[in-house]
Image (spheres, rainbow, N blue to C red):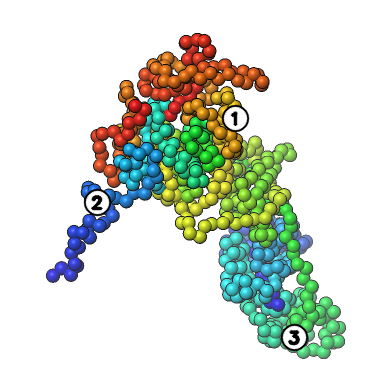
Amino acid sequence: MLWACLRFPGLAFSAAFAATPEAGPSALLDHKARQRLIAATNAEASSLGVRRGQSLAAARALCPALEVRPRDPIAEERLLTELAAWCYQFSGHVSLVPPNALLMEVGASLRLFDGWPVLAERLRSGLVGQGHAHTLAATPFAAASWVFAASADGMVLPDHEGVRRMLRALPLAQSGLPVATVASLQAMGFRRLAEVIRLPRPELTRRIGREGVNWLDRVQGHASDVLPAWQPPASFRQKIEFDAELDGSQPLLFPLRRLTRSLANLLAARDGGVQRFTLVLEHARGETTHVVVAMAAPQRDAERLFELARTRLERTALPAPARSIELEAAELPVFRPPVRDLFEPVRGDGLDWPTLDERLRARLGDAALRQIALVADHRPEYASRYGKPTDTVSPPRQRRPLWLLRRPQPMRPEPAAVLAGPERIESGWWDGGDTRRDYYIVRTAQGQHAWAYLPPGTLDGWMLHGWFA
Amino acid sequence: MNAIASPTLAQVLDHPGIWRRSADRQPRVRALATGWTSLDAKLPGGGWPQGALSEILYEHDGLGELDLVMPALAALTQEHRRVIFVAPPYLPYAPALAAAGVDLRFLHEIHAGSTEAAWSMEQCLRSGCCGAVVGWLPDIDYRSLRRLQLAAESGDACAMLFRSAEHAAQNSPAALRLKVSNTDEATYVDVLKSRGLLTTTAPLLRMRA
């Protein structure tokens, strides 16, 4: 067993600032403290002297423009779950350690991912790409990994005795014991974990309680950890609420990107795709706008999902500024990656038809893309329609024009010569679309070949119906 | 002494940028057979240039301008390669298409306004999954034409653009420009521009004589 622990020190901050990116110095307020204390700051705020643990008044005095938001524990949990979903692609056993850490068993994944250095690199580059600051450590004991992720980023130690040796050298403050316990041990004169571990067990239990002893056992691998394995959910639903109303589609792109990335993470975890999802925008007075994004084949790529959602959103006229955006995907079907021919050279963007079809539909709308089907009907207007073609109908034996006018129109000037005809078309008595016409192939003075008809028995009143283009 | 060996004349002439007007060294143009024997014989590479833009300028509807491209399009669809019609001016009529040998399952139509049409045409060409993209873009400018030409090159697709003969005098980056015009007795296809072909005054093809 090799447990990797990922800690996300900036998780609370990212969760609170999910809807709109922070601009300028920003800070997070602790929701628990009776006194309002700064819990985290961004780089800009800390360069101005705003520190963790300061009171809000002090921080404001240092930096009047400070943007402050309260911590949002629900959003933090959701973000952690989302990260667990992403990590699930690397390990079958991912466990959440609230508020801001994940544990995953990677011993079984090492061979698949070509060893720890490669796996660690993939974890790190993936997380950096998503903008999550993190620390990482791996040891055979889950609790020890958690401890070292905080104090020794990047440490990997598969050897049991080595881990225990490292632990003994740790200062008490970094041991993972509760703050009160650490304080009392320090008051007794202990500085390092080794000194505490050496104490007789009954003595130690009396001083730091059963829980503390149990923790020391777990850290050293003498007692096993019970880590519930996270299971990916079967559907996706996530909502981001805004502090202020956002007008137009442009400001919605930032939260949209977050939502689609989060969806893509879940899809990666489930090894699934999504074929249809809905964006729900909430406006004032309880109005909502639904934007349905449907695809020809299941997709899972974060960028592509975002692009599709973005084009659909931009095409939608929003009746009012939005208060929140929600992404719902009820069904997450199995994803089948596109199969390519090994020997066929990739042309251009190397897209397959379903992907191109989707891209065009997203921008032009579903009605803009169509196919033409042949129908077994004698009436010219009904012999061709937009729809899915089948190969069971055979075309009429007589010559037909390549272009058909949307509706026949009087032909002016009259044709110069008749080339063929008449062909009597008389049909449709059964559905009220009764037609009785004599069709001719005619030539105009400009040399155009046209398909035109006369009512039977007459010699003028030419109606143009098509071009032999 | 000059240390650089001066290249021989043969080496200079081998440069791909140099074209020689001689029968034995025809430039290599990959092409899609047009299906019109006399046209194939005269066009460089023997047909519609592959991975390039061809313009067909026609005087009026119904001169047989579409007949000119139908055999090539039909052959593509029969090979299960996609053919896209972008913004056609009339309804493409299924009975005639089927009679021309088009497998309708591989023919798609895109209904779009002029800016969207140019965008869709470019996307289709660039995608690499379309055999030919045929567009009717009456008011396209030089920049967009250039974009289409580049997209066709990148996606190795055959781009065909139908425009009015009024644009014949305009400059165009297309690899091949044909003009379809009519006299009393027949329809003629003339070449206005062709990469790798000596401009001739004689018409390329006489149709509907």
Can you give x and y, in whole percent of width and height, for residue A265 in the image? Answer: 65, 59
> What's the residue at 78%, 78% (across, down)?
A224
Report how far apart the C-alphas of labels 2 and 1 lie in the structure. Answer: 53 Å
Between marks 3 and 1 in the image, the one whose residue lies nearer the viewer: 1
Q: Nearer the viewer, residue B22 or A284?
A: B22
User: Which residue does the numbered mark 3 point to in the structure image?
Assistant: A190
Residue holding disc 2? B24
Which of B30/A145 is in front? B30
Few, some or many residues within 10 Å of mark 3 (<14, 14–19, 20+):
some
The mark that comes first in sequence, 3 or 1, is 3
Q: Quadrant of the C terminus of chain A?
A: top left
Q: Quadrant of residue A218?
A: bottom right
Residue A85 position (above or below residue A115):
above
Q: Where A353 sits versus A400, above or below?
A: below
Please, which chain is the residue tagged with disc 2 on? Answer: B
Mark 2 lies on a secondary structure that is helix
Q: Position of residue B58 (x, y in %)?
A: 37, 30
Question: Which disc, if any, is residue B26?
Answer: none
SS at mark 1? loop
Q: Which residue is mark 1?
A: A376
